Amino acid sequence: MFYSAKYQHNAKLNFSRLKDTVVGGRQLIRSICYIVQTPEIDQTNFMKTLDVLGYEVKSKDLKLRQDGSAKGDWDMGIAIDAMSIAPRVDVVALVTGDGDFAELVWHLRGQGVRVEVYSFTQSTAEELKRAATVFCPLTEHVLM
């Protein structure tokens, strides 16, 4: 979402408003923010801000391959966390537009969990929208 806000909306995410939007009046069990750290960007202050806002921050370093390409994603970690918490919650909210999560969403729904997907409409895969119990489009309200 950080990059969708930056490149599609020329703005930054307001992580406080984002969390308030997703949680609504419900009881929050966990809010996790997944970060890939790159050598050229110091994200220490950003991670401290997220911590102050009540996010659990999980971070890992970008992996540089011998062929010069790089890999840095949290897809498996997000899936494991979501499946681990699913038996203890009624709702899992995913803030992503990545269609790779459609199978995870179908799995969680098969476990009886309501899955809400929050993302900017133009950057959300159609298969993810279809898989979600409900798709909640993010608006400029969560931008600053």
Image (cartoon, helix red, strand yellow):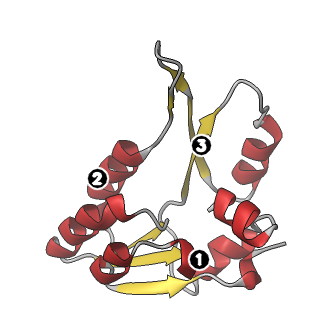
Q: Residue at (73%, 62%) from the top-left corner?
A: 7
**Residue 116 image offset from top left, x and y in percent:** 41, 79
Mark 1 to mark 3 CA distance (whole Å): 19 Å
In the rendered structure, are the residues bearing label 2 and label 3 in contact, judged by CB atoms less than 8 Å apart?
no
The residue pinned by badge 2 equals: 84
- Element assignment for label 2: helix
Q: Which residue is mark 1?
A: 120
Q: Position of residue 119 (x, y in %)?
A: 54, 74
Instruction: Calculate the distance from the C-alpha at mark 2 to the C-alpha at mark 1.
Output: 26 Å
Where's residue 41, x and y in %?
A: 77, 33
User: What residue is rendered at 76% in x and 72% in y?
Assistant: 9
The amino acid at mark 1 is Phe
Residue shown at the point (31%, 85%) measured from the top left: 133
Question: What number is the disc on residue 35?
Answer: 3
Q: Nearer the viewer, mark 2 or mark 3?
A: 3
Foreground label between 1 and 3: 1
Disc 1 is placed on an element classified as loop
Mark 3 element type: strand
In-front residue for pair 67/112: 67
Residue 58, located in which quarter of the rendered image? top right
108 over 61 or under it: above or below: below
Q: Amino acid at mark 2?
A: Ser
**Foreground pick, 126 / 36:** 126
Q: Quadrant of residue 57?
A: top right
Q: Counting residues from the N terminus, which is met first, the one under dot 1 or under dot 3?
A: 3
Q: Earlier in the sequence, mark 2 or mark 3?
A: 3
Three-letter code for the amino acid on which mark 3 is drawn: Ile
Q: Residue furthest top?
A: 66
116 left or right, relative to 21 = left
Whether residue 128 is visible, yes or no, is: yes
